[in-house]
Image: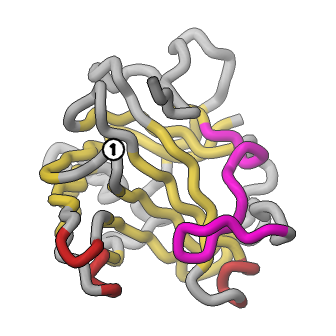
Amino acid sequence: EYSPPFLPVSADANVVLEPFTAQQLPPRPIEVMDNVMGGMSSGGWTPSPSSENCAVGAFRGSASLANNGGFASLRWRFPTVQNWSSSTGIYLKIQHSSPGEHTFRLILKDSTCERIRLTNFKAIFADPSTNGDDPILIPFGEVGDMEQMGNAMVGAPAFNPSAVTEIGVMAIKPTVVGDFELTILDWGLFN
């Protein structure tokens, strides 16, 4: 049985959480769906009405296998390059559909990705507990290899947290097919 690499840790973990603010993330993410290559998946972002912070809300949609598709994603592009080198990584507090089945991807881009077309870094995460109370901690040093259209780039440099240009989330086959919902209750940097 497959287990995603990043799951919630106990709330007792000795970490400091620094939530993203409305000033850090643009108010509306860019929607990137598989229709860029002929697919028919859909998705959108609904900011939480109970929060003044547009960085929390729900990503809802449907991942369709039609026309060789199978992904939906949201991307927040930073207006200036972010230096997160003083942090250990990204944390997320989430709830999502089909907790025993669905996994999602955190997407990161750095300045190197801006020079190499269609590249990014990804980390798989999920919260099978469904409560959303405990954070999922994704250390920068454990973010996957640079990918180009889903394929690992052998010999590419590691993710550079001192030159971050974009962050996002993705629902993708094979674990997400059909309707999904990923609610981001809180996210940001941790130490």
Q: Residue at x 47, y 39 (%)?
A: 125
What is the secondary structure assignment of the residue under circle 1? loop
Q: What residue did someone put label 1 on?
A: 175
Three-letter residue code for mark 1: Thr
Q: Residue at x 45, y 21 (%)?
A: 134
Quarter of the picture holding the C terminus? top right
Res. 95 image quadrant: top left
- For disc 1, the neighbor class at 10 Å (few under 14, some 14 to 19, many from 20) is some
Res. 32 image quadrant: bottom left
The stretch drawn in magenta includes residue 31: no
Region rendered in magenta: 138-154
Res. 61 image quadrant: bottom left
The stretch drawn in magenta includes residue 150: yes
Please tell me whether residue 8 is drawn above or below residue 85 in the rendered image.
Answer: above
Q: Residue at x 61, y 76 (%)?
A: 148
Q: Is residue 29 visible?
A: yes
The spot of residue 41 in percent (x, y) is: 20, 69
Q: Residue furthest top?
A: 12
Please tell me whether residue 52 is drawn above or below residue 50 in the rendered image.
Answer: below
The spot of residue 150 in percent (x, y) is: 54, 68
Please tell me whether residue 96 is drawn above or below residue 45 in the rendered image.
Answer: above
The spot of residue 4 in percent (x, y) is: 50, 33
Q: Is residue 44 visible?
A: no
How many circles with numbers are drawn on the protein? 1
Left or right of 157? Residue 98 is left
